[in-house]
Image (tube, helix red, strand yellow):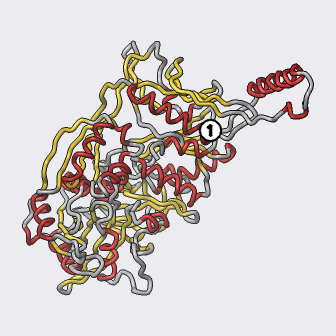
Amino acid sequence: MKHIRNFCIIAHIDHGKSTLADRLLQTTNTISDREFKDQLLDNMDLERERGITIKSHAVQMDYERNGLHYKLNLIDTPGHVDFSYEVSRSIAACEGALLIVDASQGIEAQTISNLYLALEHDLVIIPVLNKMDLPGAMPEEVADQIVDLIGCDMEDIIPASGKTGLGVENILQAIVERIPPPKGDPEAPLQALIFDSVYNSFRGVIAYFRVLNGEIHTGDFVKFMATEHEYHADEVGVLKLGQIPKQVISAGDVGYIISGIKDAREVKVGDTITHVKRPTSTAIQGFENVKPMVFAGIYPVDTEDFEELRSAMEKLQLNDASLTFEPESSAALGFGFRCGFLGMLHMEIVQERLEREFDMTVINTVPNVSYHAFTNKGEMKVVNNPSDLPGPNVLDYIEEPYITAQIITKSEYVGSIMSLCLDKRGVIKNQVYLTTDRVEMTFELPLAEIVFDFYDRLKTISRGYASFDYHPCGYKTSELVKLDILLNGDHVDALSALIHRDNAYNFGKRICEKLRQLIPRQQFDIAIQAGIGAKVIARETVKALRKDVTAKCYGGDISRKRKLLEKQKKGKKRMRQIGNVEVPQQAFMAVLKLDD
């Protein structure tokens, strides 16, 4: 065990984690030059196209120093705030972390929040100054920021470049020297933490685990403590670039287990594996459940595909433990699922993965957050969907979730960022100058205001220089109303939203205008209305396609034309009663992009 090191890489998005991980794999000869490709650990097409890491990836490297052989278990983690749950799981399986900071951009908001996650688990932090080869690198300035942030010495910071390979050998030495070997007793009863799982259509569910105590052999009879299911370990092994079977995996090591599990729901991330004959008395603690931030409905385009969508969601949930879902039905869209996501990027990625990996074409409803509604009798009801809101006769007040947001930016953008946050009903709590031209601003904002377009607008007004990170800080009472969208008097529940009273009129008017452009014209007039309760606050009309019925009357008395027009009018009226309006998929998406 004293030759094992478990570590992860944490950084802000786009600070060069994946590139540096590539260099570590090449330097330790884990991969040959022939097999090598950029962003090696990012094995999803989506990750390569967007240049972001979505999943944590574990890989074992062999490293030799002073005649001793070391086993280094690396877990590469995502940098975006929406995937911080992946980061927390990786941190739970490690003893040390490489904190990577881009020498040209300095410390960003996500760097700070990931660092706090690591410090909570008492990890050893190795600071690395990456991208030293860039002409815009500011090593002295950024090194000062790192020293202020974690209180280390200047000599502890390793200058490196993932592109050129500078400093990679120093990083490997620091991992061996500074990170402690894992603690654990190989003789104790088996205790292993599941930190990830994937679905393989031939072999069933493959669970990745870290052994804390004891050892696991191929063929052992094991038990998963949370679900209380028992299985035979058909194959255990370690993760290099592929899966390499081993006879035994003992305390301190990271590996995988295949036991022919068919049902995706039987494996829970954070569960403890132990032996059936000699079980451990306690399950591993300290693995919190995920708290979804944004809720949206996902419906199949064709209602008959509901069961296929269910199995696709279960397989996806295995690979992405932060996705939560439950069945729901909608009058407009049929049967589907109410899903909880960690943010808008997470929602977008889930939708794309359903389309790419499972060939499911889905409709997303307007995303919203979870509210607490209190009735006159003092009962609390959790409202994830605007249609769940109690009626105005029993409703006392509504509380909405608030977040504390940290924004780090250049000082020249302070004014425009402040006005953006104040427009979103934010309150400024603190403002600190990290250096002469970098400011950290802390705001308290309603979560509902940031789920739509906040991140995009923040990047636009700061020309990409602002970094953003947030965490929930509780619920506060707000004056919220339910805004309904009606087509010809029928409610479209998928487009209704809970919104602050001051913004309701503008929002309703803009939705009606957008829908008027998107809904195709019919043989009858379509009234699009936005209403609060019984009061209509905005209206647009999609005009009917009319046939010129008087064309054949070329002369004669006016009453002949009048008679034909009256006949047409009755037909239109009857058609309007029996005709239904199809809402195109673009209409649901357009509500998300109202500002474009």
Q: Is residue 390 above or below residue 228?
A: above
Q: Is residue 127 above or below residue 411?
A: below
Task: Give whichever of 555, 181 is nearer the camera.
Answer: 555
- Location of residue 522 in the rendering, given as x and y in whole percent from the top left corner: 72, 36
- Location of residue 185 in the rendering, given as x and y in whole percent from the top left corner: 24, 62
Q: Is residue 282 above or below residue 552?
A: below
- Location of residue 251 in the rendering, given as x and y in whole percent from the top left corner: 29, 65
The mark tally for this picture is 1
Residue at the spot 85% in from the left edge and 32% down from the top edge = 549
Task: Tell me if residue 398 can be seen.
Answer: yes
Residue on which the image places disc 1: 335
Residue at the spot 69% in from the left edge and 38% down from the top edge = 521
Task: Give whichever of 199, 538 is nearer the camera.
Answer: 538
Residue at the spot 38% in from the left edge and 41% down from the top edge = 293
Task: Give whichever of 62, 580 is nearer the camera.
Answer: 580
Q: Residue furthest front?
A: 555
Three-letter amino acid code at the position of disc 1: Phe
Q: Residue furthest right?
A: 556
Residue at the spot 30% in from the left edge and 54% down from the top edge = 88
- Say what secondary structure mark 1 lies in: strand
Residue 397 horizontal side relative to residue 494, left or right = left
**Location of residue 179 by image quarter:** bottom left
